[in-house]
Image: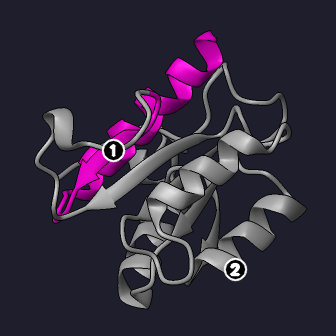
Amino acid sequence: MERRIDASPDRRRVARGGRRTTDTPGKHPTLLIAESYAGTRRVCVRYLDHFGFRVEEAGDGLEAIAKITADPPQAILVEHSLPSLPAMEMSRWLVEQPRTQSISLIVMTSEFKGGASFPFPPNVSVLVKPFPLAAMLEKIRQVLRAQAAT
């Protein structure tokens, strides 16, 4: 029996996903995940790392602010009820700082009802928990594309 050797590269080893032409040249997009539950953070970080994103983690709002101030990410995924600085207050803080006004914010919540009860500015995206990791990736890409278009 003759074995056929496929000259095409192994698809599992080819980087796909995170890096786009709209990203900063020579640099993967930087994201910050601000989530109080370490298990959720680890899963999200591993998944996004697989797609070429550079991901920072924060367990509470004060840690997130410190990381944003030190090295601003391109987008932030934040837990709605993050300890010490909930998502609503973080969105206000981002808008008030000239250096962080352009950072996209994605709020992860399990209590989304939408409509008039949604207290966030229109440029804030929502990701409803529990969410498939592919939906998170698509939301991040959508936000980064919109950010690059402005």
Tell me where residue 126 sits by quadrant.
Answer: top left
Quadrant that contains the C terminus:
top right
For label 2, the crowd category at 10 Å Cα-Cα, with few meaning under 14, some 14 to 19 and many 20 or more, is some
Secondary structure of the residue carrying tag 1 is loop
Q: Which mark is residue 119?
A: 1
Amino acid under label 2?
Answer: Glu
Q: Nearer the viewer, mark 1 or mark 2?
A: 1
Residue 145 in the magenta stretch? The answer is: yes
Outermost residue, left side: 113
Q: Is residue 3 left or right of residue 21?
A: left
The residue closer to the viewer here, 11 or 81, is 81
Query: Where residue 36 appears, x then y in whole percent?
Result: 44, 84
Image x and y of residue 44, in percent: 42, 68
| Magenta segment boundaries in residue numbering | 123-150
Q: Tell me where residue 54 sits by quadrant.
A: bottom right
Residue furthest to the bottom in view is: 38
Residue under the image location 44 percent in, 37 percent down: 124
Q: Which mark is residue 18?
A: none
Main SS of the magenta part reads helix
- Above/below status of 77 relative to 41: above
Tell me the residue that label 2 is attached to.
63
Does the magenta portion include 71?
Answer: no
Residue at the (55%, 73%) spot, across then down: 85
